[in-house]
Amino acid sequence: MKKILSLFVIILLSSIFMPSIFAQGGGTGSTVMGLPYEEIHAKHDVAMPYQYVREADVMWSKIVWRRIELTEKRNHILYEPTQAIGTKKSLIDVMLDGIETKGLTAFKAKSSDAGSEFDIIMKEEEINQQMGAETRTEATLDQNGNVDSVTIEIPYNSADIKSYMVKELWFFDKQRSVLDVRIIGICPIREYFRQSDPDRLSPLYKKLFWVYYPEVRPLLAKSAVYNPNTDVSSLTYDDIFQKRYFSSFVFMESSPYNRVIDEYESGLEALLEGERVKEKIFNFEQDLWEY
């Protein structure tokens, strides 16, 4: 009787636990998962709506242009991976995929940094050309020794994007009594070298295109990135920008002259001038309060 009861208990426990075992990767036809759970946060993330702001409540504002250098350790999260790993892509690959397949609008980057960056729409062919993609025709010899021509398609390399420009608006909202910031646009910058520079000693830089940040936000909010602190909680590119998880320096501010800092300062003095702009914004808020 005890043997029959023990056998019954074993069968009962097997019927309870075995399905869950097979559901996690065992058995024929099961879904292969690298984790014991499904990653769903990034898939369902949405961009947090901005706080509504009335024009009458904005008592002060300043537009600044920043540059994010991807060679800095803190900004590697925007550069890696250079090749997509699962659903994780670099920022430039997310933006290019949005332009190619999701209707994201790219605007022509002008030679001047000041003014409107969102009035001339670029076509996909123009973007590919700006990225370095090209078509070459080379002469070859066929089996009979006759001269023939071969067309070679050279794709662009998204790893050439080594920095970004960010245009943002800082403003003080007297209704909420806060100094706030809104990113207006992002522009990737490509690093390349002339053919006459095989040793790659003199890099050149080209502004590729602008994307309007409020338009690209929903896409960035669904694009997961590696969290350097833990694999459990993923960040998104929208988190990186909204929570200011990046390092940058200011190279221009709105003024009657609309001059890039490099036009009147150089080297260390230019960096200090950018820090002065940051400090001026910070001090404006501090000067509003009494302690």
Image (tube, rainbow, N blue to C red):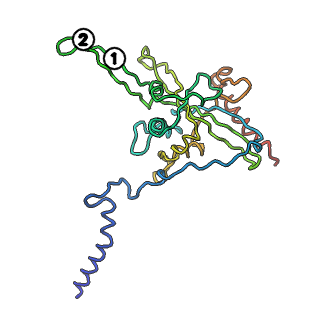
Question: Where is residue 213, by image quadrant?
Answer: top right
- Outermost residue on the top side: it is 146
- Outermost residue on the right side: it is 290
Q: Along the polypeptide, which appears first: circle 1 or circle 2?
A: 1
Instruction: Report crowding for label 2: few under 14, some 14 to 19, many 20 or more residues within 10 A (C-alpha).
Output: few
Instruction: Report crowding for label 1: few under 14, some 14 to 19, many 20 or more residues within 10 A (C-alpha).
Output: few
Give the residue drawn at x 55%, y 43%: 217
The percent coordinates of residue 57 (x first, y second) are 76, 45
Q: Amino acid at mark 2?
A: Val
User: Viewer-proximal residue, 229 or 60?
Assistant: 60
The percent coordinates of residue 177 (x first, y second) are 75, 48
For label 1, the SS is strand
The percent coordinates of residue 174 (x first, y second) are 77, 46
For label 2, the SS is strand
Q: How far is disc 1 from disc 2 in space, using C-alphas?
A: 13 Å
Q: Which residue is mark 2?
A: 147
Q: Amino acid at mark 1?
A: Thr
288 relative position to 109: left or right: right
The percent coordinates of residue 49 (x first, y second) are 61, 49
Give the residue drawn at x 74%, y 42%: 55
User: Viewer-proximal residue, 34 or 184?
Assistant: 184
Q: Are marks 1 and 2 in contact (CB under 8 Å)?
A: no
- Outermost residue on the left side: it is 144
18 relative position to 157: left or right: left
Residue 7 got which mark?
none
Question: Where is residue 164, by image quadrant?
Answer: top right
Give the residue drawn at x 44%, y 41%: 89
Quadrant location of the N terminus in the rendered image: bottom left
Q: Which residue is mark 1?
A: 137
